[in-house]
Image: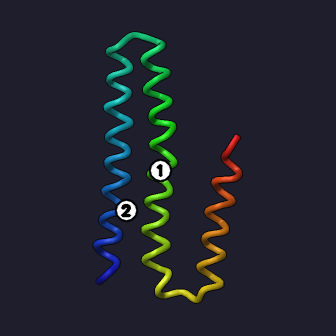
Amino acid sequence: MRTLPVLGSMVMLRILSGLLEIVTAVIILRSSSVQTALRLNAFLGLVGPIVFLAVSALGIISIAVKLPLPKVLLICTGLLLVLWGTSK
């Protein structure tokens, strides 16, 4: 039952991230300004990876106690490859 608080935290981070995206879209729509839209989009571009890393870290930490070290390292390597593959 220890996974329930971790899972709840992961879900809440994703819900908050989604709400932030929706609120930002409404603000962009109401502003009717390309400059404002670009600024807000840049902000969301920063928030997205931070949420991804936070949710991934919570998940990895929660399963790290159950898995052997080589598998945890393999998961971390996969996470780093996702970040590397999606970078410029």
Residue 5 in the image: above or below residue 18: below
Which residue is drawn at the image coordinates 49% and 63% (left, top)?
A: 56
- Above or below residue 7? Residue 62 is below
Give the SS element for disc 2: helix
Quarter of the rendering occupied by the N terminus: bottom left
Using the image, determine if residue 9 lies above or below residue 46. below
Q: Nearer the viewer, mark 1 or mark 2?
A: 1
Above or below, 36 relative to 23: above
Say whether residue 88 is left or right of residue 9. right
Q: Quadrant of the C terminus?
A: top right
> Which residue in the protein does label 2 denote?
10
Residue furthest to the top in view is 32
Q: Position of residue 19 (x, y in %)?
A: 32, 41
Q: Residues within 10 Å of mark 1 (few under 14, many from 20)?
A: few
* Rendered residue at 65%/84% (across/down): 70
Q: Which residue is mark 1?
A: 50
Quadrant of res 8: bottom left
